[in-house]
């Protein structure tokens, strides 16, 4: 599908679209998804990423494999952010994802709307301590 074909959905029909892709996806290279999003911004919104983010959001997930799995945070409610956006008009700036080992959450952080990314802003020197890998210790920048 050509990116320009999203104009009818996003602009004329006030559609909302969330796209996500894992950076560690071995089954489908993540770069074409990023390229596609950038093409949508260019063709549908004349390159205005701020306007685009009111209709379409891209979340590039560090450490996530093909739709889930991998060493990074990769689990979240995929429907809730879209429902909030459609029903309340609040575009998600980030989603909070978790990673679990043996049923225990061992990594939690925001996955920021592209082009931002989560940066550790927790206790100084604590970025390598898994005890500090909680969403409140990261900021979208």
Image (cartoon, grey):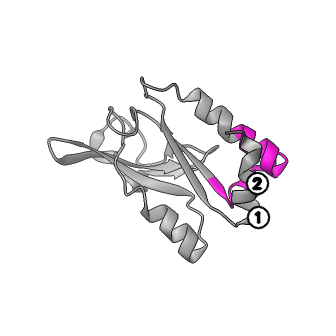
Distance Cα–Cα, label 1 vs label 2: 7 Å
Observer able to see residue 50: no
Left or right: where 82 falls relative to 78: right
Residue 66: image location, x then y, percent: 40, 33
- Label 1 SS: helix
Q: Which residue shows up at 43% across the image and 28% down it?
A: 24
Q: Is residue 125 visible?
A: yes
Q: Is residue 43 magenta?
A: yes
Assess disc 2: are there few (<14), some (14-19) or many (≥20) residues with their C-alpha within 10 Å of its C-alpha.
Answer: some
> Quadrant of residue 27 in the image?
top left
Sequence-first disc among 1 and 2 = 2
Specify the segment rendered in magenta: 38-56
SS assignment for the magenta stretch, majority:
helix
Is 117 situated left or right of 3 in this image?
left
Mark linked to residue 77: none
Element carrying mark 2: helix
Say the numbered circle drawn on residue 12: 1
Quadrant where the image shows the N terminus: top right
Q: Nearer the viewer, residue 101 or 57?
A: 57
x 66%, y 41%: residue: 37
Q: Position of residue 12 (x, y in %)?
A: 76, 64
- Mark 1 packing: few (<14 Cα in 10 Å), some, or many (20+)? few
Q: Image point 61% across, 29% down: which residue?
A: 32
Give coordinates of residue 97: x percent, y percent: 38, 50
Residue 91 on image: x %, y %:
60, 64
Contact, mark 1 vs mark 2 (Cβ under 8 Å): yes
- Residue 73 lies in magenta, yes or no? no
Q: To which residue does mark 2 refer?
A: 7
Q: How many marks?
A: 2
């Amino acid at each position: 599908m050509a990116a320009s074909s999203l104009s009818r959905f996003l602009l004329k029909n006030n559609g909302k679209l969330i796209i996500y892709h894992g950076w560690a996806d071995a089954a489908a290279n993540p770069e074409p998804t990023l390229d596609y999003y950038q093409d949508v911004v260019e063709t549908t919104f004349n390159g205005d990423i701020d306007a685009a983010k009111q209709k379409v959001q891209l979340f590039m997930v560090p450490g996530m494999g093909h739709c889930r799995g991998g060493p990074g945070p990769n689990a979240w409610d995929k429907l809730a952010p879209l429902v909030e956006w459609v029903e309340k008009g609040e575009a998600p700036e980030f989603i909070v994802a978790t990673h679990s080992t043996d049923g225990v959450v061992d990594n939690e952080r925001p996955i920021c709307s592209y082009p931002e990314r989560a940066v550790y802003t927790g206790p100084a020197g604590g970025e390598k301590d898994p005890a500090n890998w909680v969403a409140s210790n990261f900021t979208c920048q």
